[in-house]
Amino acid sequence: MPLAGFDLSLSQDCGGKPVVGVDEAGRGPLAGPVTACAALIPTGAAHLLSQVDDSKKLTPARREKAFARMSEAGVLFGFGYALHSEIDSSDILSATFLAMRRALERLSASAGRPLSDFVVAVDGSMKIRGLEADQRAIVGGDGKSLAIACASVRAKVLRDRWMARLDGLYPGYGFAGHKGYGSAGHMAAIREKGPSPVHRLSFAPARRGQAPLKAGV
């Protein structure tokens, strides 16, 4: 089923409610924020978004093109994030849900409509904790739902840009290249320099410069 067809079917199953897709970027890195986006595709705009797919399937250049195309198509977004300090004060799953709730709150404000007007399609196997809305958890949703795919691309592009800015603030760690993930060069930099102010100290490799923990994207 095409990505837009999935969303149409979901909307019909939910009484015609528009579908808002939600996805995150940056759960696994050792530094920087976890980001989230919520996406609402205008009626009749899906045919303009053929370049959009799961962000993990796109090269950086194709993500940037898709990012621009979504803006041209009038896709409405809400952006949310949880900082490294918020991750450390709770846990990565709770921080991810916080970022998603913030993204949805901003989309709702931009749309001028309550979240109860929508069905929220969340990438993954879990619904968003603490969110009072009609939700559907969609495993592999960024490869099934166009709204989730749009959210996936925007969350990834905005986080990558954020990490590039952090690279300028904290040189020597290579944030612009590895985006905070536990590459060999990143591990070596932590061992040599110690963790930066934006490292997630609740992640053991960020404290010790050891081999990275296995974590989700």
Image: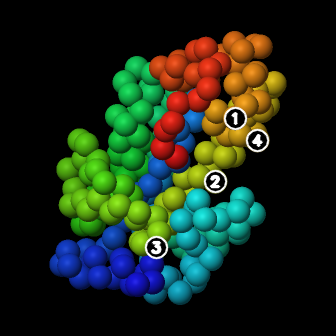
Across and down, in percent, residue 152 comes to: 51, 59
Choose mark 4 or mark 3, whichever is in front. Answer: 4
Q: Earlier in the sequence, mark 4 or mark 1?
A: 4
Give the residue at mark 3: 146
Q: Amino acid at mark 2?
A: Val
User: How far apart are the two marked residues, 2 and 1, measured between alpha carbons?
Assistant: 20 Å
Is 11 placed above or below 206 here? Answer: below
Q: Earlier in the sequence, mark 4 or mark 3?
A: 3
Instruction: Answer left or right for 27 relative to 194.
Output: left
Q: Amino acid at mark 1?
A: Ser
The image quadrant that residue 187 belongs to is top right
Choose mark 2 or mark 1, whichever is in front. Answer: 1
Is 124 placed above or below 169 here? Answer: below
Q: Which mark is residue 183?
A: 1
Pointers 1 and 3 in contact (CB under 8 A)?
no
Is 86 placed above or below 95 here? Answer: above
User: Tag 2, which secondary structure?
Assistant: helix
Q: Amino acid at mark 4?
A: Gly
Instruction: Answer left or right for 139 relative to 163.
Output: left
The image quadrant that residue 211 belongs to is top right
